[in-house]
Amino acid sequence: NAGVTQTPKFQVLKTGQSMTLQCAQDMNHEYMSWYRQDPGMGLRLIHYSVGAGITDQGEVPNGYNVSRSTTEDFPLRLLSAAPSQTSVYFCASSVQETGELFFGEGSRLTVL
Amino acid sequence: AQKVTQAQTEISVVEKEDVTLDCVYETRDTTYYLFWYKQPPSGELVFLIRRNSFDEQNEISGRYSWNFQKSTSSFNFTITASQVVDSAVYFCALGTGGFKTIFGAGTRLFVKA
């Protein structure tokens, strides 16, 4: 069972470059979200979606864009990468609004 | 505002010791959910438990137990007879309406053989 799949697992960018982190889930979950994990700060919510066509901002949305054109996919876009966006990114999905989160394996991003 | 505080940054114990990880939360909502997740050294995030605000019964699952006290806004996690495989970062999380689950900073547990 695939669950939540994130790609790429590792990425190095230069300041100012753009990229998209891909996230796909095959569990037909309505709810999907992106978190970033930084040392000593836990996981912070970037953006989330409660269904196709609906997205909203989390705690730290600046510098990131999302869209949700299908139930399965929820890509995270960095339009102009900055060193402060160096982090580990996790995509998660849930079958209900306050249910347990199913996480992808994470994507480690380094911005030089 | 919603907030989750895990005051213990790191805990180190010797195998077979019991250890309690503290979690204190803040919310004005009357309906909310509390979670614990485990992140072993391999990096994945593993769900451990979900508890809703109307259910204050303590729960035990093998060597794991959870103590939920609304009066002190705490949801503490105890590992009995710890093992080396319990070494991980443990996150407490708070979920309220609108699919906004927020996490504490995590507690890193080291269990020495």
Image (cartoon, coloured by chain):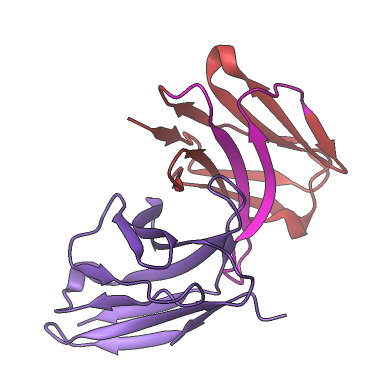
Chain colours: A purple, B red
In the picture, the quarter occupied by the N terminus of chain B is top left
What is the x, y in percent for residue B24?
50, 27
Give left or right: position of B13 versus B105. Answer: right
Q: Can residue A38 be seen in this view?
A: no
Extreme-front residue of the structure: A53
Q: Give A58 or B25, whichever is nearer the viewer.
A: A58
Q: Locate residue A25, reporting x and y percent.
A: 56, 75
How many numbered circles does the render carry? 0
- Is B41 covered by the magenta stretch? yes
- The quarter holding residue B20 reads top right
Q: In which quarter of the image is residue A10?
A: bottom left
Whether residue A56 sits left or right of residue B54 in the image: it is: left
Q: In the figure, residue A34 lies in which quadrant? A: bottom left
Q: Which residue is drawn at 35% across and 61% down?
A: A54
Quick one: B104 or A69, which is closer to the camera?
Answer: A69
Vertical order, A56 against B23 (above or below):
below
- Residue at x 50% of width, y 38% of height: B94
Which region of the structure is painted magenta?
B29-58
Q: Position of residue A73 (x, y in %)?
A: 46, 77
A85 vs B68: above or below = below
Position of residue B98 measured from the top left corner of the image (x, y, whole percent): 43, 44
On screen, B34 above or below A95?
A: above
